[in-house]
Each structure stands twice: as C-alpha cells, then as structure tokens.
Amino acid sequence: MSDNSLFSAGIKRRDFLRLTAGLTAMMGLPVSMSSKVAEAATADNRPPVIWLHFQECTGCSESLIRSGHPDTASLILDLISLDYHETLMIGSGYQAEESLHNSMKNNWGKYILVVEGAVPLAENGVYCKVAGKTAQDSLKEVAEGAAMVINIGTCSSFGGVQAAAPNPTKAVSAASLVKDKPVINVPGCPPSPYNLLAVILYYLTLKKLPKLDQLNRPEFAYGRRIHEHCERRPHFDAGRFAEQFGDEGHTLGYCLYRLGCKGPVTFANCSTQRFNDVGVWPVAMGHPCIGCTEPDVMFHTSIYDRVQIHEVTPPDFYPNANPSKRGKGADPLTTAVVGMFAGAGIGASAMMAKKLPKEGEDEEDQA
Ligand code: FSX
Ligand code: SF4
Ligand code: F3S
C-alpha cells in the first residue's frame, strides 16, 4: 500500500500521524520511533493474512469493522493483504477455497494466520466444519505454513464461552493446539481493535513479536490491571460503591466492585485505550468488567460474584507517602496501607479519603 492509497481511503494525514504517535506510546516504544511506525504503516510490503473462523460469534470481526475514527478497520485492512476471511470476502464456495489454497501456496512460510474462535474436539470435531473439514484439521493445515499465529479474541486464545462448563463440544483454544509456531494471544470478547492494530504494526516496524506475558498476550496491552487506571478507582479507595444497578451510587458513578466488577483481577488496557474513539468502555458505561480477557474469569465465575482482592496495586496518580520520595511512585508502605484497607473491605486509605469530597459536598468546597 502506498502512502497515497492510505490517505485516499479517507484517513486524514493529521489523524493518521496522531494515531501512529498514540500507538507508538501504547506499544511502549520511544516517541522517536513514531516516524518509523508511520513508515511501516505506509510501506509497500503488506503481509498476507489468512483469517479462520471456528466456534465463535464473529464479534471479533464485528468489533474490527465497526471501529471509529480514524477508521481502524481501514488501517488494518490496508496494512495487510487479507487473502481469506469467511465473513468479509466476496467469494464463496469453491472460489473461496481456491483463494485460501492459492494464498497458502504462494506465501508458504510467510503468511500470518489469524484465528477467531475455539476448536471443538468431541466426536472427531464434527461440531465445527468448514468446506467439509473439521476446525482441528483446518487449523493444523493452515498453521503449518504460517510465519506466526495471532489468536484474536478469548475463544481462540483460551476457549471462551464454548469451553465453559459443561463444554459439550469439548472445545479448546486454538492456542493450545499450535505448538511449533510463534503464537500471540489478543484476548477480549471482543478484543479491542487497537490491540490487533498495534500487534501488526509492531511486527511490521520491528520484524519481531512484542514482549509477551505468561499467557502469550502482548505486555504493552495486557500488562496492567483494569483496576489500576479505572476512573471509578477513587470511589473504590474511598469505600463508595454502587450496591444495585440504578441506585444512587450507580447513578453517581461509584465503584462497581460490589456489582461483581472483575477489574481487580483483569489484565487489559480498556480503561486507558478505550473503544472506538468515543472514550467508552464497559465500566464507564456503568457495567462491571466481566474479565473478558482472562482465561479463568469470564464464563467461569458468575457476573455478580465478587472477586477476591489479594493484591491491590495503587494507581499511578497516588502521591507517595514519603515526602522525600514524591514523584517516584508509591513506596511499599503506601501500597501496604492501601492494600490493607481495601483487602479488609473497609474502603480506602485515609490519605485518599481525605482528598475526596465527602457525601453531599462539592469538589469545589474541598479546595
Ligand atoms: Fe465472539 Fe470472537 Fe467473543 Fe469469541 O470475539 S466476541 S465469542 S471472543 O471469538 O467472536
Ligand atoms: Fe473500577 Fe471495577 Fe476497580 Fe471499581 S472494582 S475501581 S469499577 S475496575
Ligand atoms: Fe472485557 Fe473488562 Fe475490558 S469485560 S472489554 S476486560 S472492561
């Protein structure tokens, strides 16, 4: 893709540069790399991508193609050569199969395989077949010639809803079946399209995978808990909780922990990156996080159950308790005090509580 085709696709240069600068920061790269990222995004070396669908709801693809401004979908689709995608391609039947096999043959060892959905193993995989082949066989065949495998969504990363008890089709993650290729998981149900875009851009810019966590997720996107950067966090620390949907606390934007929010045990960047450029994410909309990026949370615990808080990490904006160390992050004492209070379920550190307005008091009254 050339620079011109990207901009003629309706993406304004200023928006594009702003986006690549933001993505550079999100990927944990120095700002000086921003021009390299923009260069990689406009270079003429689109990697071929084969996108397979197994057991899922197509929400991952939906989330991608319905992304906002600048149009993330256009960006991703312009960055890659999407040779096969069952729901987006125009061709069907034998024509579609031919395009899959041509792409594999012409790009053997070089294409990126994106997998959406889990793989059922019960009864020889009969519960998910495309073109007469089971999901398991298709995955094996296409993964063999791939340079790397990106599992998009929680179903392909961890099994998702299909693998929830009693798991009648014996669904497993695609990640668990691919053993001899670099695998990167981009979970979320659905995942943020920015995370897929950032993974592809990182790979195109640096020709390697980003640093991964123990669940093969890119650390730049899944390295921190939702809870650390949640706008409702001061309410958690102050012990102010919504007790029921629609009650006063809920209306006032209090913490959703008691409604079952899984933010304290969920690693993802929803609270910072947000979705679709309109600044929303589930918790901002008043819905508790359901832990959709974690293997053992969503569909494994009920939505309204409260998670155990073992370790409370203070948000970045906490002042340091030790004045001589201010500006260097929270010291262990601050962390311990915050953790002790929150862990005991009695609300926040006195420090934060002092800073927050009391019930019925305006913030301005505090100043
Ligand atoms: Fe759906 Fe994707 Fe959830 Fe799964 O997203 S949004 S069920 S992660 O595979 O289509
Ligand atoms: Fe935000 Fe949920 Fe943490 Fe409350 S428990 S601060 S709503 S992430
Ligand atoms: Fe999922 Fe929680 Fe984010 S439910 S979309 S990880 S806020």
Image (cartoon, helix red, strand yellow):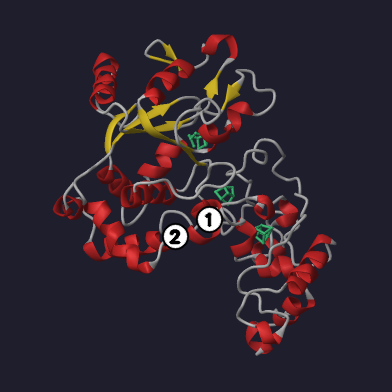
Image position, residue 359 (x, y; %): 75, 77
Amino acid residing under circle 2: Met
Image position, residue 141 (x, y; %): 39, 19
- Is 217 on the left-hand or right-hand side of 205? right
Instruction: Report the residue marked by disc 1.
Output: 269
Mark 2 Cβ inside 8 Å of ligand 3: no
Q: Which one is nearer the viewer's eye here, 155 or 360?
A: 155
Q: Which one is nearer the viewer's eye here, 270 or 158?
A: 158
Quadrant location of the C terminus in the rendered image: bottom right
Instruction: Report the residue marked by disc 2.
Output: 26
Q: Which one is nearer the viewer's eye here, 360 or 304?
A: 304
Give the alpha-carbon distance from disc 2 to disc 1, as whole Å. Answer: 9 Å
On the rendering, which quadrant does ligand 2 occupy? bottom right
Is tag 2's residue or tag 1's residue first in the polypeptide sequence?
A: 2
Vertical placement of residue 170 versus 283, above or below:
above
Image position, residue 193 (x, y; %): 42, 47
Q: Residue at x 56, y 47 (%)?
A: 213
Mark 2 or 1, which is nearer the eye?
Answer: 2
Q: Residue at x 52, y 27 (%)?
A: 118
- Is 190 on the left-hand or right-hand side of 138? right
- Is 83 on the left-hand or right-hand side of 28? left
Could you tell me if the residues under marks 2 and 1 are in contact, i.e. CB atoms within 8 Å?
Answer: yes
Mark 1 Cβ inside 8 Å of ligand 3: no
Vertical placement of residue 293 versus 181, above or below:
below
